[in-house]
Image: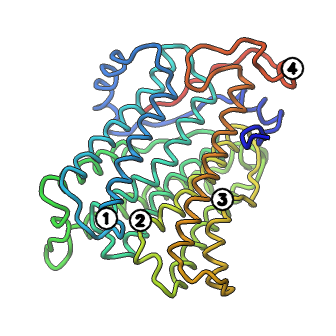
Amino acid sequence: MSILTSTILEASQLKRLEEHKYSSHGKSIAEAVMQPFWNWAIEKVPRSIAPNTLTLSGLALNIVSSVLLMFYCPTGSEEAPGFVYIFCAVCLFIYQTLDALDGKQARRTNSSSPLGELFDHGCDAVSTVFVGIATSITLQLGAHPNEFFFMCFAGLLLFYTAHWQTYVSGTLRFGKFDVTETQLCIIGSLFISGLFGPGIWSYQIHGYRVSTFVLVFSTIMTLLTFYQSFSIIFGEGGSGRNGSTVAGTSVISPVIHFAAVLVLALMVMLRSPTQLFQNNCCLFILMFGIVSAKITNKLIVAHMTKSGMDFADTAFIGPLMLFLNQYLGLPCSDERVLLWAATIWCTADLVRFCSIICLQISQYLGIYIFEITSKPPSSKKSSVSTSKKPVTRSSVKHK
């Protein structure tokens, strides 16, 4: 039996997902500036191209450019050739543009669906991992591992918290300084490193590195965003019964999953006899970032299907391999080999999870993932097609 023929979502979850309506509130400052460009760009996109194709293409470029930067800077402290930073900046801009165009393409081709919304947010969760690593490399934070760790995990937690409060309130909220502004700042930083060299971030002003000022600014904006999200989660309460989440679960429950990732990362980092994180910053964050992307995707699915989140997850096998090797004295003495094995496992697990989810939803809704046209009725699953109503189109966000 193929590994992609198994199912993850139950029929009741698929039904609720079909009924899901996208809800968002607020616009960031840069959105008004970028909208004319995005409106111009969407007219250049052929109507035959599926929105998910645009999303995945942007993500692929983002991953390729970030991996190239990691190749030249495996510990996050090396200096890559200037063209690599420029390439990363261009790819991130293309990713941002395609991420803005996929929703517009869905609306202009009348192909909006819950699958498109899930695909968009899911790719954003993965992109957050690579963008965080690329940013830390650009600022040469590998020479300051604790700052590297903070920068990357702050970004992961910000994205997770945004969807946590969406799971609680039912509405995705955007601040005045949000993802678009953050991406533009990162693009600018990459261009500066490409033109003047990343060493510019190590210059000191009154005894402080330039990168320290960047980190302080990032910390302030992060705390402000956390305050906005937590005031909704714990202040306003959930949209479900008795102030619960949209699934009727505790508003606090999602914290357990990310806390498990963070605690495991800290314990492995602090316990390592070979300074595993300090010597392999990029690979270390990549592995734990992929685990974070998996649980974030599960949170997004839970919101859209109005379901609870199971704590047990195969994604934790990777971190547990490192944890148990350290704390139980297992025979693998080369932690770096184990880190590579954990990264491969977590990547395969994430790809499998996303593939099964997308295939299940596409079959249930009777639509293709990367084509505009709908599937013929005979291609839908017989087990659910007899009780299905026509596909409900939901508007997909776009910045």
Residue type, label 3: Ala
Left or right: 12 in relation to 350: right
Residues at discs 3 and 4 in contact (Cβ within 8 Å): no
Residues at discs 2 and 3 in contact (Cβ within 8 Å): no
**Residue at 60% in and 30% down:** 22
| Residue at mark 2 to residue at mark 4: CA–CA distance | 48 Å
Closer to the camera, 158 or 84?
84
| Residue 147 visible from this viewpoint | yes
Residue under label 1, please give it. 73
Secondary structure category for the residue under label 2: helix
Secondary structure category for the residue under label 4: loop
Residue type, label 4: Ser
Secondary structure category for the residue under label 3: helix
Mark 4 crowdedness (10 Å alpha carbons): few <14, some 14-19, many ≥20: few
Q: Is residue 273 above or below residue 363?
A: below
Callout in the foreground (3, 4): 3
Instruction: Determine the image quadrant of residue 378.
Output: top right
Q: Is residue 375 above or below residue 283?
A: above
Which callout, 1 or 4, points at the residue further toward the start of the chain?
Answer: 1
Residue under label 3, please give it. 315
Residue under label 4, please give it. 387
